[in-house]
Each structure stands twice: as structure tokens, then as C-alpha cells.
Amino acid sequence: MAATGISRGRHGTITSATIDGSVKIMARYRPLDGSAPRQVTATGPSKAAATRALNARIVKLQQDLDAAAATAARTVVASRSLAALFGDLFAELRLANELRPQSLAEYERTARASILPAVGEWQVADVTPRQVADYLAEVHAATPGSYKTVRTLLSQAFSLAVRNGTVTDTPVRGIRTPRRGRHVPTTVDTPDLAHLREVLAGLVASPPQRPGPKSRYADLLDVIDVQLATGMRVGETLALRWPDVHLDGIAPHLDVTGTVIRTVERGLHAQPFGKSHASRRGIRLPDWAVATLRARRGVEGELVFPSRAGTVWDPGNLRSLLREVRVLAGLPDLTPHTLRRTYGTAVHRGLGMTAASAALGHSGENVTRQSYVEPAPLGPDVAAALAGLAPTITGQHHRQNEVN
């Protein structure tokens, strides 16, 4: 058989010769990678022994070639940057299709905005635990809210490098997460809410004179009322559709069925499911929220709070408008999430933690307790429960007896 006709992993015709009592045999072997055939020779006291030796040498040759190819591949991959590794990671995550679109979009935004500008040029094989620890410490000091996501992404990227054989262990392993100071949830109190509504009502009646489209102060006032009445996330509020609003029955309520997200593929849009399974929920409405929503029934389209163009209202634009009004009202801290915490705290104080967790769409009470319910300024009134611990005589009588 001609050399060019040798199949991969096979040898060609064996030739033999007897020299000084030993048998020498030769054959051309074509490696599994399809490269040019290699000449392999072996000797033995007999043709059978020489053939066994030849086969052993072929096996050893293929093993050496495999090892060399693996080393070369690791060298090439290891010389790649962390930015290239993140490209591989996101390709794998998209292929697996296990993350919700908003989670994948948030991961990609964090990588582009925070990770790659800082450490994207690091060479994968050269990264040390000390480097990663120092970088994560900087992230925690500058933007503690993004620390968990950044660490998760680095861990996933280096885990991929381990699976690919680029490195033997991840440098993220064993790095301790810095302890954060205890977060105390804050809310907006009744007097500040009244002042905020008063400022907004004034802006609706006499909007500032400036070029461009009029600011949406009236719409913002309605959003604030609905958020305070429902505790919905801002994305859930802006994805609210009229088919999910039920105002005319004996128990007016709305159904939370989706949220607003932004993805690379579709941009800003409303998706028909929420942040988690617990996000899908029904919320009963107080009378004042029913009145607010009834007054909006003239809004065209399916969305309750659309943009001027009738599409999804960008949460970023709403936050900017709320920030403008907050400054005018002189309130130091007010965001859509503050309104959500205010709702959660009110439900907790009136109905308990379990009710607050369910109303907020949480999968468990721990998140509600730690991040959404403002601690009460005073503990519970326990005077009646302590009545049985009172002394039989007052302290004053006791002192009088000592004097006598």
C-alpha cells in the first residue's frame, strides 16, 4: 500500500530482513492527527518478536505525539488573555441556555464595564491567587454591590480554564470574601411621602419651562402610588399590562407576570416572566391605588406605564426623573427600591414577615428580613407579658422598711 494510502492510526506494509541472526522489520505509521507517515523499525530474535516490538514502538510513538500536541495546545491557550477566556465562557453560557436572559445580560455588562477594563489583559496561565485577591479587594472597596457578581464570573471563567486543561486549579479558590457592614434597610416616612407628592403635584400644575418634551411628572406620581401600593420591582411596574389589572371585582388586584429587561439581542423589552418563580404573584390593591389606576384607563396600548412612543418605558429614565424630583424635594435617599422597601416594611408591621415576603415576591423570608424591612424604632410592647415578674411590694416600700 502506498504511503499516502495509509489510514490514520494504521501502519503500511511490513518489510523484514535477517541480519546476523536477528530479524529487523520496518513499517510506515500514519499518526491519528493525519500527519505524514513516520518510519518505525524494530528487531527481535524472531519475526514474531520483532513484530511485537514494532507494535509497541508504534504505541509509544502515538503516545509521545499525543502528549506533545496536548502540551502545545495548553501553551497556546495559556498564552491567551483573560478577555479571550471570558469570550469562551459567555459562548458556553449561551449554548447551555440555563441562565435567564436578564442574568446573562447582567453578567456581560459587568464583564465589559468592570472586569475586562481592569484585568482583561492578564495571561490566563500567569494569574496568581494574590493578584485575584488584590483585584477583588479593590472591587469590594469601590463598588461592594458588584463584588459578588465579579467574583462569580472570575470563578466560572477559571473553572472553565481548569476543564480545558489550561490551568490545574483556579486562583479564585480559597479567597475570603471581605465582611460587609450590616445593611440596615431604609424607607421613606409618611411626612416625606406627603412632601414628595406635594412637590410632584406642583410640578404637574406648573412644569418648568425648558426646551424639549415635557417631563412626565404626572406619570411619575402614578408610578410612585402604584409602587407604594404593590411593592413591585421597577421592572415589574413598567411591564404591567392592562390585561393583568383587575379593578372591578369584589377584590381589586393585579397580577405580576413579567418584568422589563435589556439584552444584547433584543435591547429593552418586557419579558413574560419575572426574576424568579416567586415573582409571579397576585397583589390586592388598596382603594387609593384602584383610583389611581382607574384614572389611567385612557392610556393607549397594552402597557399601563408606556414610554411616550407607546413602547417600554426605560427604567433608567424613570430613575433619572425620580432623582430630579428627589433633589427638588430635598430628600436624601429615594429610589424605586426605597418605595419597595417602604411597602415591605408596612406589610411586615401590619401582617408579619411571612406576608411581607410573599407580597414582595421573595422565595424566602431571609432576603426580606435582611434587605427589605426597616427595623422598628421601638421593640414590641411587652409590659403586659411582664406583669407576672413584678415584685410583691414596690421598691419605694422596700426602702421605707429598711429605714424603719
Image: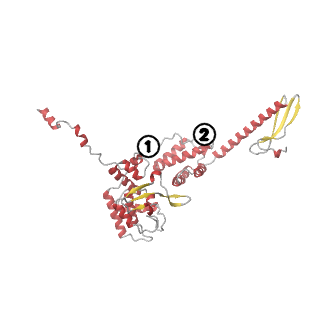
Pointer 2: residues within 10 angstroms few (<14), some, or many (20+)?
A: few
- Classify residue 127 by image quadrant: top right
| Circle 1 Cα neighbour tier, 10 Å, few/some/many (<14 / 14–19 / ≥20) | few
Q: Amino acid at mark 2?
A: Thr
Residue flagged by tag 1: what amino acid is it? Arg
Q: Where does the image place residue 99, in percent across and percent down from the top left?
A: 54, 51
Residue 364 seen in the current view: yes
Q: Percent x, y for residue 225?
A: 37, 61
Q: Position of residue 17 (x, y in %)?
A: 88, 33
Looking at the rendered image, the quarter that the C terminus falls into is top left
Residue at the front extreme? 250
Is residue 221 shown to the viewer in this render? no
Image-quadrant location for residue 251: bottom left
How far apart marks 1 and 2 lie (CA) works out to 29 Å
Q: Secondary structure at mark 2?
A: loop
Q: Residue at x 88, y 31 (%)?
A: 18
Q: Quadrant of the N terminus?
A: top right
Q: Residue at 57% across / 44% down in the picture?
A: 158
Task: Determine the image quadrant of residue 320.
Answer: bottom left
Label 1: state its secondary structure: loop
Residue at the disc numbered 2: 168
N-term mark: 1 or 2 = 2
Q: Position of residue 400 (x, y in %)?
A: 13, 35
Question: Label 1, on which residue?
Answer: 179
